[in-house]
């Protein structure tokens, strides 16, 4: 069976789309194609990658014109099942459905709640756009063959609108980040690591401020949301305690995790974060690092329930500092927390178990 994944936003090497979902389908014996922006035609570990160049400027032009280019390429591939990953591709998915194709919508985010916090949308318009998009999304999913959701919270949103939903959590691949204890005993530094998008709402300012009150340094790996976010951090006195790594590849991430003492993810209590399941949190756990995380109820259930870290008020710099320093001062207990986190990933929070849900969905669709 020929399967085609579509994205107009994500890189062809996106972890969820390519490394996890498409790779799992290839291993299961499917012929897998991936249409992605701004790349060349290539074979990536058995995935047939088709690049579409985005020459349009601005969000409106991308949504209006580039998504049509993605759709035209999808028609050329002529697959039996199409699996799209961006809300702006809903119209393309509906057109493919009208042509008799089976179509899956992979919902990565709670987009209506996300719209409500988008800084580039005028504040007075956010609520009406959010409500309007939610109605459109709900109507659209009724016409599609299946939904894949990235969190249980998103799944709950659609239970009244789709009878074929699989929640496939974005948990880590166990083998990728496994680090034997014998390799790390002598390599740990007094450092805290954050991997991911860098912005104030993701905790960047409070994390940098907090590190200045500890004996540790902060390793910051990722891209800034914009140059203003970077300027804000560089003006802080505590910036001198930061080792800014920029965007690094998966091998480099593993290397930096190996030498860190704790992973941190203190996202601010925004509506689109509270019920999220950030992959970085589980990757820290997979590597055997204790985790300092925001004290959202869902996250506390995971972190404190598995005794693999400390949950803090993400808006309280002093509380974050104390948690970091406690980890630094208690290496034995910190190591035990890290081991607990690794066990939790091995038994529950891993891609190997999540991929089976995805494969079951495809097998079900192929029989219809």
Image: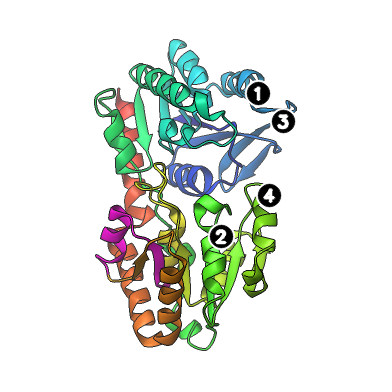
Q: Position of residue 287 (x, y in %)?
A: 44, 69
Q: Residue at x 42, y 57 (%)?
A: 172
- Label at residue 205: 2
**Nearer to the camera, 189 or 232:** 232
Earlier along the polypeptide chain: callout 1 or callout 4? 1
Q: Quadrant of the N terminus?
A: top left
- Per the image, label 2 sits on a secondary structure element best described as helix
Q: Distance between the residues labelled 2 and 4?
A: 12 Å
Q: Quadrant of the C terminus?
A: top left
Q: Is residue 184 left or right of residue 288?
A: right
Q: Do the residues labelled 2 and 1 touch (CB within 8 Å)?
A: no
- Per the image, label 3 sits on a secondary structure element best described as loop
Q: In the rendered structure, does residue 297 fall within the stretch colored magenta?
A: yes
Q: In the rendered structure, does residue 236 fall within the stretch colored magenta?
A: no
Q: Name the residue under label 1.
A: 66
Earlier along the polypeptide chain: callout 2 or callout 3? 3
- Label at residue 76: none
Figure check: 210 above or below 3: below
Figure check: 268 above or below 312: above
Earlier along the polypeptide chain: callout 2 or callout 4? 2
Q: Where is residue 94 in the image (x, y as percent from the top left)?
A: 45, 16
Q: Mark 3 points at which residue?
A: 53
Q: Is residue 317 left or right of residue 45?
A: left
Asked if one can make out residue 195 in the rendered structure from this viewpoint, the answer is: no
Earlier along the polypeptide chain: callout 1 or callout 3? 3
Q: Residue at x 61, y 57 (%)?
A: 222
Foreground: disc 1 or disc 3: 1
Q: Distance between the residues labelled 1 and 4?
A: 28 Å
Q: Name the residue under label 4.
A: 228
């Amino acid at each position: 069976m020929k399967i085609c994944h579509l994205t107009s936003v994500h890189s062809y090497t996106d972890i969820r789309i390519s490394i996890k979902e498409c790779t799992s389908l290839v291993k299961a014996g499917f012929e897998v194609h991936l249409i992605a922006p701004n790349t060349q035609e290539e074979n990536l570990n058995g995935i047939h990658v088709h690049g579409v160049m985005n020459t349009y400027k601005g969000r409106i032009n991308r949504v209006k014109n580039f998504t049509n280019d993605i759709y035209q390429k999808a028609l050329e591939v002529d697959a039996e099942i199409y699996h799209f990953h961006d809300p702006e591709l809903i119209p393309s998915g509906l057109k493919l459905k009208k042509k008799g194709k089976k179509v899956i919508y992979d919902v990565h985010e709670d987009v209506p709640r996300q719209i409500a916090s988008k800084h580039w949308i005028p504040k007075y318009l956010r609520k009406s756009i959010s409500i309007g998009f939610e109605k459109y999304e709900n109507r659209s999913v009724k016409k599609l063959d299946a939904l894949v959701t990235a969190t249980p919270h998103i799944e709950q949103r659609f239970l009244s609108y789709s009878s074929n939903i699989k929640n496939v959590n974005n948990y880590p691949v166990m083998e990728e980040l496994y680090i034997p204890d014998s390799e790390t005993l002598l390599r740990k530094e007094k450092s805290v690591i954050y991997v991911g998008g860098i912005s104030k709402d993701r905790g960047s300012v409070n994390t940098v401020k907090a590190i200045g009150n500890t004996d540790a340094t902060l390793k910051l790996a990722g891209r800034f949301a914009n140059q203003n976010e970077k300027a804000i951090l560089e003006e802080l006195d505590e910036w001198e305690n930061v080792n800014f790594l920029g965007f690094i590849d998966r091998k480099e991430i593993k290397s930096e995790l190996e030498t860190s003492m704790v992973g941190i993810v203190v996202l601010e209590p925004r509506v689109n974060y509270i019920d999220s399941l950030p992959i970085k949190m589980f990757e820290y756990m997979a590597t055997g690092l204790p985790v300092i995380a925001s004290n959202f109820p869902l996250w506390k259930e995971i972190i404190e329930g598995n005794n693999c870290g400390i949950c803090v008020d993400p808006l309280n710099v002093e509380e974050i500092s104390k948690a970091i320093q406690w980890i630094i001062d208690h290496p034995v207990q910190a190591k035990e927390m890290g081991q607990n986190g690794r066990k939790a990933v091995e038994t529950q929070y891993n891609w190997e178990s999540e991929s089976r849900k995805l494969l079951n969905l495809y097998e079900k669709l192929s029989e219809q």
